[in-house]
Amino acid sequence: MASATGSSSLRSSCSLPNLLVWLLNLSLLALATAALGPVFLLRPRPTPFGWALVSVHAATLLSALAALCAQLTHLCLAGHAALALAAMSGHALASAAFFLRRDRSLALLGSARDRREQLVLAFLEEVLLLGMFLAQAVALAAACVVRRRWAREYQAAETEKAAVARKRGRKMARVQAESAAAAEAGVKAVDEKVMRSSSGKKVHWANNDGFEEC
């Protein structure tokens, strides 16, 4: 009963943070999938720099999927935090490269499109990278808060469960002690009754023997 109460209170208290984490991770999935478009539109066969961007988006997809699995199973996955930090590092580095060295980044991508299309696709990629960075940071912080609440409320539920078990054990011990005392008192009463009846029979036999001798 205590565990059910604890789990229900845990779910109710963490419903809004859980919803926030779900929405953020779903948005990360959408952003990472959309960010693959500009990379392949700039060059269908990406250069090493293009594949680096693809690996950043893949890490974002994996971290979002790991976060969703952690939300479903209520497990704290260390791999999720590692993937999230790796993805955030990639977002920051790629955004800095596009923002500070846009021409150099476009040259590394090796696109055959005209200059205007390259600038539009690069700007779109930069916006998506910044959006993923912000969403990843907020999602990671919200996931840490939710898991901390899970741990705290799980510990409180276990403490309450242990207290109920101790109380039940003391009650059972008291009942057993009372039952043993009642049984002992009953045995003593039966023994006393047997002793009185046996002593009465001895007196009666002694009186009968004395009468016959006279």
Image (spheres, rainbow, N blue to C red):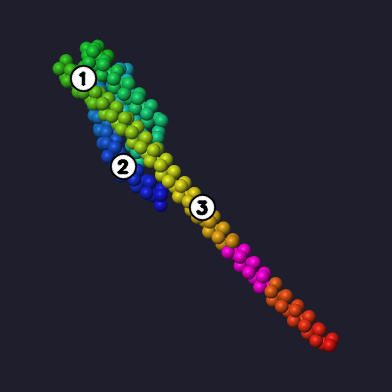
Q: How far across and how far down the image is residue 104, in percent?
A: 24, 11
Q: Nearer the viewer, mark 3 or mark 1?
A: 3
Q: Nearer the viewer, mark 2 or mark 1?
A: 2
Q: Which residues are magenta?
A: 182-194
Most distant residue in the left direction: 116
The residue shown at (19%, 18%) is 118
Most distant residue in the right direction: 213
Frontmost residue, 214 versus 79: 214
Disc 2 marks which amino acid?
Ser
**Quarter of the image that includes the C terminus:** bottom right
The residue indicated by pointer 2 is 13
Label 3, residues with CA under 10 Å away: few <14, some 14-19, many ≥20: few
Q: Can you see residue 62?
A: no
The residue shown at (34%, 47%) is 8
Disc 3 marks which amino acid?
Arg
Q: Can you see residue 7?
A: yes
Q: How far across and how far down the image is residue 17, in percent?
A: 29, 37
The residue indicated by pointer 1 is 122
- Residue 59, quarter of picture: top left
N-terminal of the pair, mark 3 or mark 1, is: 1
- Residue 54, quarter of picture: top left
The residue shown at (77%, 83%) is 207
Task: Give the structural element (helix, strand or loop) at label 2.
Answer: helix
Task: Give the structural element (helix, strand or loop) at label 1.
Answer: helix
Question: Is residue 193 shown in magenta?
Answer: yes
Q: Nearer the viewer, mark 3 or mark 2?
A: 3
Q: Which mark is residue 210?
A: none
Q: How far across and how far down the image is residue 97, in percent?
A: 26, 15
Q: CA distance from mark 2 to mark 1?
A: 42 Å
Q: Which mark is residue 170?
A: 3
